[in-house]
Image: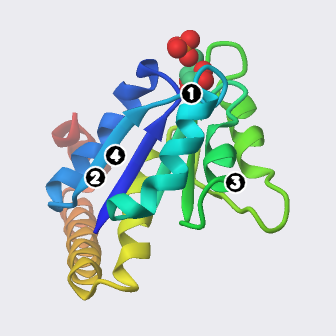
């Protein structure tokens, strides 16, 4: 069981490292490649077409600007594709968001927020969790941890009040 991560440029790597960090934390196996839909169209198509043969069960595709990559990857595979729109200087990621989210019926890309690479990792795990019970357990444990942390924070806020809470936080 593997997750495939593909991004349009090495300039996307700093954001996508956050996705890798989460997958590492949960000991999830993944492969990560740079392959642009525009600069390397044939390589990208081949990578997507063969992904399932390499044990990949879900794909995370990230790109900025005229972000064709997630859609092109989705067109070349039957695997679920999660799209991550990334920020660019001119349009702040809205360009990528619109490019990725507006797919034609029949070829969906499950699009997360602009720079939402961490949620792409969590969503990939949730998708894998449908088939792999041990992955679903990891997701459930993580949710319980988040809930416990949120409760703890509120308890602290109630105890010390706004000013001290913020002072401690900073
Ligand atoms: C997109 O163009 C890439 O995903 C990247 O976000 C953006 C800019 O690429 P570089 O010029 O930094 O390589 O295809």
Cα distance, mark 2 to mark 1? 19 Å
Q: Earlier in the sequence, mark 1 or mark 4?
A: 4
Name the residue beneath numbered marker 3. 75
Name the residue beneath numbered marker 1. 36
| Disc 3 + disc 4, Cβ < 8 Å | no
- The local secondary structure at tag 3 comes to helix
Q: Earlier in the sequence, mark 4 or mark 2?
A: 4
Horizontal placement of 157 versus 54: left or right? Answer: left
Name the residue beneath numbered marker 4. 19
Cα distance, mark 1 to mark 3? 14 Å
Q: Residue at x 35, y 26 (%)?
A: 14
Cα distance, mark 2 to mark 3? 21 Å
Q: Position of residue 102 (x, y in %)?
A: 80, 51
Ligand 1 is within 8 Å of the C-beta of the residue at disc 1? yes
Mark toward the viewer: 1 or 4: 1
Horizontal placement of 106 versus 31: left or right? Answer: right
> Which quarter is ligand 1 in?
top right
Q: Nearer the viewer, residue 87 or 32?
A: 32
Q: Nearer the viewer, residue 152 or 163?
A: 152
Q: Which mark is residue 30?
A: 2
Horizontal placement of 51 versus 125: left or right? Answer: right
Cα distance, mark 1 to mark 4? 19 Å
- The local secondary structure at tag 4 comes to helix
Q: Position of residue 59 (x, y in %)?
A: 47, 56
Q: Residue furthest top?
A: 89
Horizontal placement of 50 versus 70: left or right? Answer: left
């Amino acid at each position: 069981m593997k997750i495939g991560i593909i991004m349009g440029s090495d300039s996307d790597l700093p954001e996508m490292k956050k996705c890798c960090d989460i997958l590492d934390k949960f000991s999830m196996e993944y492969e990560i490649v740079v392959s642009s839909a525009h600069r390397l169209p044939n390589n990208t198509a081949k990578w997507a077409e063969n992904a399932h043969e390499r044990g990949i069960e879900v794909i995370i595709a990230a790109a900025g600007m005229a972000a064709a990559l997630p859609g092109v990857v989705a067109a070349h595979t039957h695997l679920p594709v999660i799209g991550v729109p990334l920020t660019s200087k001119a349009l702040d990621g809205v360009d990528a968001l619109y490019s990725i989210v507006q797919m034609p019926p029949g070829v969906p890309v499950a699009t997360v927020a602009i720079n939402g690479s961490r949620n792409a990792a969590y969503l990939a795990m949730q998708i894998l969790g449908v088939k792999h019970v041990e992955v679903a357990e990891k997701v459930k444990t993580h949710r319980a941890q988040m809930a416990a942390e949120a409760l703890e924070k509120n308890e602290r806020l109630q105890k010390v009040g706004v000013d001290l809470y913020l002072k401690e936080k900073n």
